[in-house]
Image (spheres, rainbow, N blue to C red):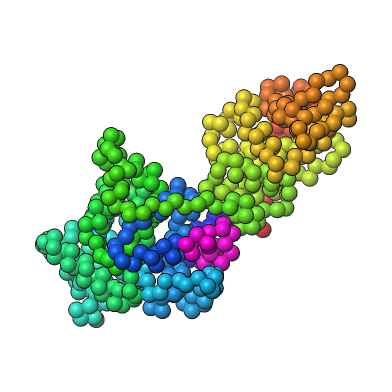
């Protein structure tokens, strides 16, 4: 099965940067312009976005472009050429920025955040940390390590250095001077400014997240350093409250660490689903899928997951021939209602259960009435009925009161999900469709993704 989940690998970061299917290249340019204008002091930026909004891709794409412009980076020539070709020639990328990406979540078992960050810098190949260099960065880190208590990663440094560098704790001033020395050596090797991209701090254990913020603020106060934190501020505030107490002012606390807060714009879900997830074989089905993702405001990660489910479900839709009312009902329900069922499963399982029990028609009605859906209203009309598109009113013939299209959709919903359609009972005819127990079973099977017609190979 082809995996439509885009993990933030270097290959995928470069691929999405080149295609710009989520429409963020312009935001990346603006962010780098901001970085270039923050060179007079030590700045800390909070890039705010909820989980799954694509923050990791965003900061890794910025890092990629900065590395491409820095001749001292280890990027290969082909990737450098492709990366630089994604930005407008009139846009100037800041030069000689040394960049470090640090995933705080996978490192929150370390005792000391400073030593953990320094080790990440070394392991990211941002420094030539070798035993052969006398009075080089290796000696600086060896001395710095002896001032810290991160004993759980001492063996990692020992493998690089070749000897145990941990000893008695040194003074606080000595630690600060050693960190300055570390930054000096790092910038001398690779550039004129150091950018730390800190990711997933909002997922860390509260004690580690707090220690990270406080120790980094305390020791990395250097005018040549910028920190970019990719975080959900709402989650990080919850972390602060869980550590200091629910009554603690988490917003003011975080203001001590962040000089600037920037919110990441939402992605173009329609472009992402249509282009990146390669949906378009079942036109009605795909449009309803896109509108469902937009209606529930899915994040980038949620959209990826939803797209995988849609690919499986769309392959299971039977090619029902028009002309038989029961087959028309299956086709209508498969194309228009299955995408909503699957979206509800992801969005809120309790709301999904209510929907399937016949007590919550609102999501279906609201989505199918969205202008982009282009609902095939003629399937819903009998031979005596006409539809006024401008007013969305169904005229039912002489002597009968007109009804809104929304009411007719509720009739369809009731026919499918109420207990009136059960095994052995006569079907309910609405317009050109007859909804039977088999209709419900058909879409339930497709939505379960265990239909015999399901294909698990994506093209």
In the figure, is residue 432 to the left or right of 257?
right
In percent of width and height, residue 71 lies at 41, 79
In the image, residue 276 sits, relative to residue 383, either above or below, namely: below
In the figure, is residue 172 to the left or right of 392?
left
The total of numbered circles placed on residues is: 0
What residue is shown at x 35% (from left), y 45% (from top)? 236
In the image, residue 447 sits, relative to residue 202, either above or below, namely: above
What residue is shown at x 25% (from left), y 40% (from top)? 244
In the image, residue 455 sits, relative to residue 165, either above or below, namely: above
Span of residues in magenta: 11-30
- Name which quarter of the figure residue 325 lies in: top right
In percent of width and height, residue 142 lies at 19, 70
In depth, the one of 70 and 11 nearer the eye is: 70
Q: Considering the image in quadrants, where does the C terminus appear? A: bottom right
- Name which quarter of the figure residue 196 lies in: bottom left
- The chief SS type of the magenta part is helix
Q: Considering the image in quadrants, where does the N terminus appear? A: bottom right
- Name which quarter of the figure residue 212 lies in: bottom left
- The answer to whether residue 106 shows anywhere in this view is no
Q: Is residue 17 magenta?
A: yes
In the image, residue 248 sits, relative to residue 422, either above or below, namely: below
In the figure, is residue 278 to the left or right of 98?
right
In percent of width and height, residue 68 lies at 45, 73
What residue is shown at x 29% (from left), y 64% (from top)? 41
- The answer to whether residue 332 shows anywhere in this view is yes
In percent of width and height, residue 129 lies at 28, 74
Q: Is residue 48 magenta?
A: no
Q: Residue furthest top?
A: 399
In depth, the one of 401 and 55 nearer the eye is: 401
What residue is shown at x 75% (from left), y 39% (from top)? 375
């Amino acid at each position: 099965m082809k995996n439509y989940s885009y993990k933030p690998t270097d290959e995928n970061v470069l691929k999405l940067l080149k295609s710009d299917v989520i429409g963020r290249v312009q935001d990346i340019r603006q962010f780098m312009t901001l970085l270039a204008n923050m060179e007079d002091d030590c700045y800390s930026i909070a890039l705010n976005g909820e989980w799954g909004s694509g923050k990791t891709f965003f900061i890794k794409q910025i890092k990629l472009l900065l590395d491409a412009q820095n001749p001292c980076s280890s990027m290969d020539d082909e990737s450098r050429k492709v990366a630089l070709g994604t930005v407008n020639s009139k846009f100037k990328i800041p030069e000689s920025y040394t960049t470090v990406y640090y995933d705080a979540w996978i490192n929150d078992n370390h005792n000391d955040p400073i030593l953990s960050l320094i080790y990440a810098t070394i392991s990211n190949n941002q420094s030539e940390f070798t035993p052969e260099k006398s009075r080089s960065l290796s000696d600086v880190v060896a001395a710095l390590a002896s001032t810290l208590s991160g004993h759980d990663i001492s063996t990692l440094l020992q493998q690089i250095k070749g000897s145990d560098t941990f000893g008695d704790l040194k003074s606080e001033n000595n630690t600060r001077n050693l960190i300055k020395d570390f930054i000096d050596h790092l910038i001398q090797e690779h550039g004129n400014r150091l950018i730390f991209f800190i990711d997933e701090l909002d997922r860390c254990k509260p004690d580690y997240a707090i220690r990270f913020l406080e120790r980094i603020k305390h020791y990395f106060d250097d005018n040549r350093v910028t920190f970019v934190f990719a975080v959900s501020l709402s989650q990080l505030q919850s972390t602060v409250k869980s550590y200091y107490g629910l009554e603690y002012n988490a917003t003011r606390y975080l203001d001590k660490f962040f000089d600037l807060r920037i919110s990441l714009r939402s992605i173009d879900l329609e472009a992402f689903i249509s282009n990146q997830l390669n949906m378009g074989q079942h036109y009605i089905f795909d449009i309803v899928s896109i509108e469902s993702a937009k209606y529930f405001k899915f994040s980038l990660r949620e959209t990826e997951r939803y797209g995988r489910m849609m690919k499986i479900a769309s392959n299971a839709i039977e090619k029902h021939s028009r002309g038989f009312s029961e087959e028309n009902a299956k086709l209508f329900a498969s194309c228009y209602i299955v995408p909503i069922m699957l979206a509800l499963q992801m969005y809120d399982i309790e709301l999904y259960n209510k929907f399937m029990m016949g007590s919550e028609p609102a999501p279906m009605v609201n989505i199918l009435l969205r202008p982009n859906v282009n609902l095939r209203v003629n399937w819903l009309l009998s031979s005596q009925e006409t539809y006024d598109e401008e007013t969305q009113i169904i005229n039912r013939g002489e002597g009968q009161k007109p009804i809104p299209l929304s009411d007719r959709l509720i009739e369809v919903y009731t026919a499918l999900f109420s207990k009136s359609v059960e095994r052995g009972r006569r079907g309910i005819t609405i317009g050109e469709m007859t909804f039977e127990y088999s209709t419900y079973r058909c879409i339930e099977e497709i939505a379960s993704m265990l239909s015999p017609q399901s294909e698990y190979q994506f093209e």
